[in-house]
Amino acid sequence: MKDRILHTIKQIEGYRDGVEFYENLCKTAEFIKEEFKTLGFTVQTDDFELKGRKYSNIIATKDGVSHGKDWILIGAHYDAVHGSPGADDNASGVAVMLEVARALGPKPSLMFVAFTLEEPQLNTVEFLIGSKHFVKEMTGRGLGFRIALILESVGYISHRPDSQILPPFVKAPRVGDFIGLVGNKKAIAVMEKFKDTASRYVPGLKVVTYKAPLKGYLLPETRFSDHAPFWDAGFPAIMITDTAMFRYPYYHTEYDRAEHLSPDFMEQIAMALIKIIEELIPAQDKSLPRQSQESS
């Protein structure tokens, strides 16, 4: 598994922002579509235009998206910030997502989404453009999400003392050797279930959880990925992350390359995610009550 993860990262790695390297972004989208199709998924796109160009979120499900309020979504953005080849941010997330899809295969109520334009764009101050469009489009169709699990920069680990920077008022280890789960209030039960499942099946993976109060507005960095639009729409959502700028020395630079990442760490994350989803799917109508969109 770890060899495939690393291979996928190297396939995606490269300049692919939505403006200067638009063609590369489109090639990456086609690569992801073909990977999902090879795995037996029905692939659809959620398309939109920005500054006269078409962009696509890629949706992979068993039989297509038409209805349903209990989707379990696994997502990762496939664009990179301008000037960076984006190995950790976020080829790593896409690679792990594809391995989870490979292991689980198409299942009812299971949705994989590769988001575009997560990063700030040269021609606008906006970001999370793709996921905002997706959430608005899907909720407009009446779809709902039991949980959204968003993979955001999951490839870097460090065992050096003080390698982990901590934001104000956040309690966590000061060694960057864990995977972080950042969720809203509605996602607490799933975060704890993830932590318990990882301890049973992937005991070598350290998991640290953090509940972001007030939809993350007290600590804006907790909103810097595609989980935030789900929070804003009232759904449970979790960002799964190596903490990016709080740990990774090559964050948003030209040096964000595969050589700095840990295939073992990413394999552990993929294995834990596979196990938690296997436990969540049969529990959909039992231990996880349907959540309303009224409280966060």
Image: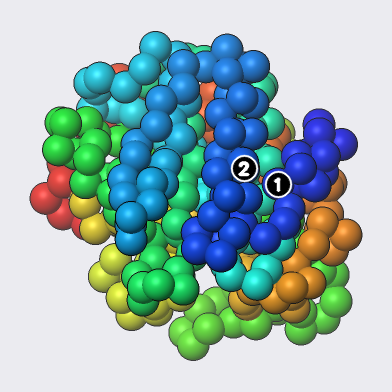
Give, as a three-letter code, the residue at label 1: Ile
Q: Residue at x 15, y 31 (%)?
A: 142
Between 233 and 294, the one lying in front of the other is 233
Point out the residue furthest to the bottom here: 168
Between 218 and 172, the one lying in front of the other is 218
- With respect to residue 152, does 220 lie above or below? below
In which quadrant is the N terminus drawn?
top right
Residue 231: image x %, image y %? 29, 56
The residue carrying pointer 2 sits among few (fewer than 14), some (14 to 19) or many (20 or more) residues within 10 Å by Cα, namely many
- With respect to residue 278, does 48 lie above or below? below
Q: Residue at x 21, y 46 (%)?
A: 136
Tags 1 and 2 touching, CB below 8 Å? yes
Q: Helix, strand, or loop for circle 1?
A: helix
Q: Say whether residue 189 is left or right of residue 66.
A: right
- With respect to residue 53, does 109 lie above or below? above
The circle on residue 12 is: 1
The circle on residue 59 is: none
Residue 12: image x %, image y %? 70, 46
Quickly name the residue at label 2: 28
Residue 256: image x %, image y %? 75, 67
